[in-house]
Image (cartoon, rainbow, N blue to C red):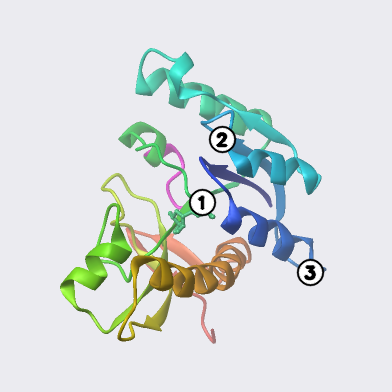
Amino acid sequence: RRVAILISGRGSNMLWLIEAANAPGFPAEIALVLSNRPDAEGLTRAKDAGIATLAVDHKNYPTRESFEQALDAALVAHDIAFICLAGFMRVLTDWFVERWAGRMINIHPSLLPLFRGTHTHRRALEEGVLVHGCTVHFVVPELDAGPIIAQAVVPVVPGDTQESLAARVIVQEHRLYPQALRMICDGTARLENGRVVFAQGW
Ligand code: GRF
């Protein structure tokens, strides 16, 4: 199972996915790290980890569609079976999402369906929720709305700031994302008629 990780930034989740996939018996191989930003810190970190990297700069394409065609062509050329979005900051069109339906997952720093979109930690503090966390879900055309594969919960504690809360959540992201990737690659979780079906006995 050849997996591509799509990033735009520092790529800490990416590094944990690479690390997990290096373990013997992991049902997937990280075959490509692709960034829409050529200067993404994560690209250097992926190269250092010995992974093939590629920058497809969205600024070089006149339309979202032409950018995504280039993205898709690169993924097909690398024989990719699954995509992990890991801090990939481009909204994807229905065309791309449907092409990769059931084969593309994302990690989001909130307990979905709460706090779709950005600034999730700030909004969690503003709302006064007492638990927060992260979610791995299949990607569907609607932003941060796909069927949920795995979630992890953290407490919100008195005196928390956006930074302290983000730091607590990211630890769980790093643990959860490899677990969820394993689940879709070994068939423990799959998308069927718009819902996640978990293997029996799991
Ligand atoms: C993570 O918080 C992830 O949930 C969100 O963007 C951030 C990416 O961080 N989608 P990193 O690049 O993996 O360090």
Q: Secondary structure at mark 1?
A: loop
| Residue under pointer 3 | 25
Residue visible at 45% across and 53% down? Answer: 102
Report, in whole angstroms, how far the alpha carbon at label 1 lies from the one at label 2. 10 Å
Say which label, 2 or 3, has the lower sequence index: 3
Say which label, 1 or 3, has the lower sequence index: 3
At label 3, counting other C-alpha atoms closer than 10 Å, the crowd grade (few under 14, some 14-19, many 20 or more) is few
Residue visible at 34% across and 63% down? Answer: 147
Q: Amino acid at mark 3?
A: Gly
Residue visible at 51% across and 51% down? Answer: 86
At label 2, counting other C-alpha atoms closer than 10 Å, the crowd grade (few under 14, some 14-19, many 20 or more) is many
Q: Amino acid at mark 1?
A: Ala
Whether residue 31 is visible here, answered yes or no, is: yes
Say which of marks 1 and 3 sits in front.
Answer: 1
Label 1 close to label 2 by CB (< 8 Å): no
Looking at the picture, does residue 127 appear above or below residue 21? below
Which one is nearer the viewer's eye here, 149 or 33?
Answer: 33
Q: Quadrant of the C terminus?
A: bottom right
Question: Magenta region: which residues?
Answer: 98-103
| Residue under pointer 2 | 35
Looking at the picture, does residue 101 appear above or below residue 37? below
